[in-house]
Image (tube, rainbow, N blue to C red):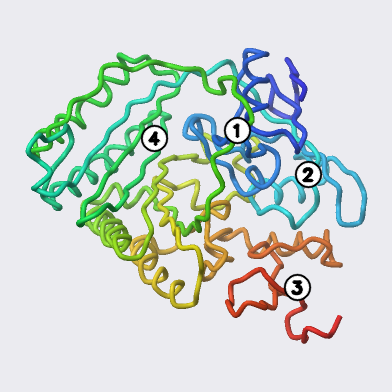
C-alpha cells in the first residue's frame, strides 16, 4: 500500500492510495489510521478491496456520501488474457477500465493493483433501533419497541424503511435484519449510520421517526448515547465464523419510496416474502444506500456499475440457511423473490450478494451495459481464458453437475452444446 498525497489524472486533483489486490479490508483500515485518511473499503475485515468486491460494485458505510468501491478507481494494473501487463485508466485501455469497474470480476483480466481516491478522515455516528413482535404471553413486562400485533409491527418496520430515504439523501447508510422467531414472532434490528454528523445532529435528525413510531403505539425512545468513531478504525484480520448462506437479492428503486401506493405494495411484498422464513429457514436483510451518478463523480459515473445501483434505495435480500439446495427449494424462493421483482420491474440485483441461479441474470446484474460488456469480453479474451458463472460471455460454457442439482458448481466445465467427453 502506498499513500499518494497529491495525484493528478484528468479533472481529478487530490489524495490517492495505491492498493495491491491481495490487501484485505482490516489492513486498509490500519493504513487509513496510520496516514490520517479515509478511502472506501469493505465492511468485513477479511474482504479484499481490490478484486471481486470492487469489480462488481462494492458498497459500504460511506457509499451514499462518496460512492461505491468501483467509483473510487482512478487506475488499474491488469494482466490480460494474452499475458500482457497493462495499465487501464480513462485514457489508456479505456475499455478495460470501464468493464472492470462494476462489470463483474474474473472475466476480463487479473487485477494486480488499483489507485483509489482518498479523502480526509470521516467520522461516523450510528443510531440503532430494535422492534420486536412478541407473543402476548411474553409481554407481562414489555421491553421498549415490543408489540403483540403483527400489523403494528410491520407498520413500524415500514415507517423506518421509508424514513431511511432521508438518511440516504443526507449521505447516510442503513443496515437492517428481520429475523423470524418461534411462535410467529419477529425481531427487526437496524443501524442508521451518518458520516460527518455529530451525535446531537443525529439525534435531531432521527426524532421525527420516533415521534411517528410513538404515534402508532410503539413505545420506543430515540437513543441519546451516541458516539462518533472514525471510519476505517484499526483492527485485526479476524473474519466471521464460516457460514452456509445463499443470497438472493433485489435492488429496489427510489420510485418505490416516492409514491404512496407503490410504497404500500413494496412493504407488503417485503412482509409476505419475509414471513415465508418461518417455515422455510431464511431471514430478510436490507442494506440501504444511494450511490447516485452524481455521488460517484469522475470517473465513477462512467463505468459498468449496474444502473440499478444509481437509482437504488434498498438492497433487499432473502438469506437462505439450508444446508442442501434443491430444485424444489429454488422454486420456492423464486416465488418469494418474484414478490420483490413484481414491485421493481426493470430494476436489478447485486452480483456480489446475488443468486447464481438469478433468472435473466444478464439484465439483473448488468442492465443495459450487458451488450457492451460482452463485446469487450470477446475482444479481450477470445480464447475463453477466464470464466465465472453469470459473468458477461459466460453462456458459452456450463458446469455439468455430478450431484444431481442443476445449479451446482460440482462438475466438469464444458462448452455448451458439447458432451462431457468432447474438448
Element type where label 4 sits in the image: helix
Q: Is residue 53 left or right of residue 411?
A: left
Mark 4 vs 3, N-terminal side: 4
Residue closest to the eye, 188 or 17: 188
Mark 2 vs 3, N-terminal side: 2
Element type where label 2 sits in the image: strand
Q: How crowded is mark 1: few (under 14 residues within 10 Å), some or many (20 or more)?
A: few
The image quarter containing residue 275 is bottom left
Q: How far apart are marks 2 and 1 (CA)?
A: 24 Å
Task: Name the residue located 26 percent from the left edge and 57 percent from the top edge.
Answer: 271
Which label belongs to residue 168? 4
Q: Nearer the viewer, mark 1 or mark 4?
A: 1
Residue closest to the eye, 207 or 73: 207
Mark 2 vs 4, N-terminal side: 2
The percent position of residue 34, horizontal first and vertical second, equals: 67, 13
Q: Which of marks 2 and 1 is in front?
A: 1
Q: Nearer the viewer, mark 2 or mark 3?
A: 3
Q: Mark 2 = which residue? A: 111
Q: Is residue 27 left or right of residue 353?
A: right
Element type where label 1 sits in the image: loop
Q: Is residue 123 left or right of residue 388?
A: left
Q: Mark 3 = which residue? A: 413
Q: Mark 1 = which residue? A: 238
Q: In this view, does 52 lie to the left or right of 154?
A: right
Mark 2 vs 1: CB contact within 8 A? no
Task: Name the residue located 31 percent from the left edge and 39 percent from the top edge.
Answer: 189
Amino acid at each position: 500500500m502506498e499513500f499518494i498525497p497529491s495525484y493528478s489524472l484528468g479533472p481529478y486533483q487530490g489524495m490517492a492510495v495505491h492498493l495491491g489486490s491481495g490487501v484485505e479490508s482490516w489492513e486498509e483500515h490500519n493504513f487509513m489510521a496510520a496516514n490520517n485518511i479515509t478511502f472506501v473499503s469493505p465492511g468485513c475485515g477479511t474482504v479484499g478491496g481490490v478484486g471481486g468486491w470492487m469489480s462488481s460494485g462494492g458498497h459500504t458505510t460511506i457509499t451514499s456520501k462518496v460512492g461505491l468501491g468501483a467509483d473510487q478507481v482512478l487506475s488499474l494494473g491488469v494482466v490480460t488474457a494474452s499475458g500482457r501487463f497493462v495499465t487501464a485508466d480513462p485514457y489508456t485501455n479505456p475499455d478495460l477500465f470501464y468493464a472492470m469497474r462494476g462489470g463483474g470480476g474474473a472475466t476480463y483480466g487479473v487485477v494486480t493493483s488499483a489507485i483509489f481516491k482518498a479523502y480526509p478522515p470521516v467520522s461516523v455516528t450510528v443510531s440503532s433501533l430494535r422492534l420486536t413482535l412478541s407473543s402476548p404471553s411474553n409481554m407481562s413486562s414489555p421491553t421498549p419497541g415490543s408489540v403483540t400485533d403483527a400489523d403494528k409491527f410491520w407498520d413500524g418496520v415500514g415507517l423506518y424503511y421509508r424514513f431511511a430515504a432521508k438518511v440516504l439523501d443526507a449521505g447516510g447508510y442503513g443496515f437492517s435484519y428481520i429475523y423470524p422467531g418461534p411462535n410467529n414472532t419477529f425481531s427487526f434490528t437496524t443501524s442508521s449510520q451518518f458520516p460527518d454528523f455529530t451525535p446531537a445532529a443525529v439525534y435531531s435528525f432521527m426524532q421525527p421517526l420516533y415521534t411517528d413510531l410513538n404515534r402508532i403505539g410503539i413505545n420506543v425512545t430515540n437513543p441519546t448515547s451516541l458516539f462518533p468513531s472514525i471510519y476505517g478504525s484499526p483492527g485485526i484480520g479476524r473474519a466471521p465464523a464460516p457460514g452456509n448462506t445463499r443470497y438472493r437479492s433485489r435492488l429496489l428503486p427510489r420510485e418505490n419510496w416516492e409514491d404512496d401506493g407503490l410504497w404500500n405494495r413494496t412493504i407488503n411484498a417485503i412482509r409476505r416474502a419475509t414471513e415465508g422464513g418461518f417455515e422455510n429457514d431464511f431471514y430478510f436483510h436490507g442494506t440501504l444506500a444511494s450511490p447516485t451518478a452524481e455521488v460517484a463523480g469522475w470517473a465513477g459515473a462512467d463505468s459498468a456499475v449496474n444502473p440499478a445501483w444509481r437509482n437504488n434505495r434498498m438492497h433487499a435480500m432473502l438469506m437462505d440457511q439450508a444446508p442442501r439446495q434443491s430444485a424444489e427449494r429454488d422454486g420456492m424462493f423464486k416465488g418469494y423473490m418474484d414478490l420483490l421483482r413484481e414491485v421493481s420491474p426493470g430494476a436489478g440485483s447485486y452480483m456480489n450478494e446475488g443468486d447464481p441461479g438469478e433468472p435473466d441474470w444478464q439484465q439483473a446484474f448488468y442492465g443495459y451495459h450487458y451488450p457492451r460488456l460482452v463485446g469487450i469480453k470477446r475482444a479481450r479474451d477470445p480464447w475463453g481464458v477466464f470464466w465465472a458463472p453469470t459473468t458477461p460471455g459466460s453462456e458459452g460454457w456450463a458446469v455439468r453437475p455430478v450431484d444431481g442439482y442443476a445449479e451446482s458448481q460440482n462438475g466438469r466445465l464444458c462448452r455448451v452444446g458439447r458432451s462431457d467427453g468432447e474438448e
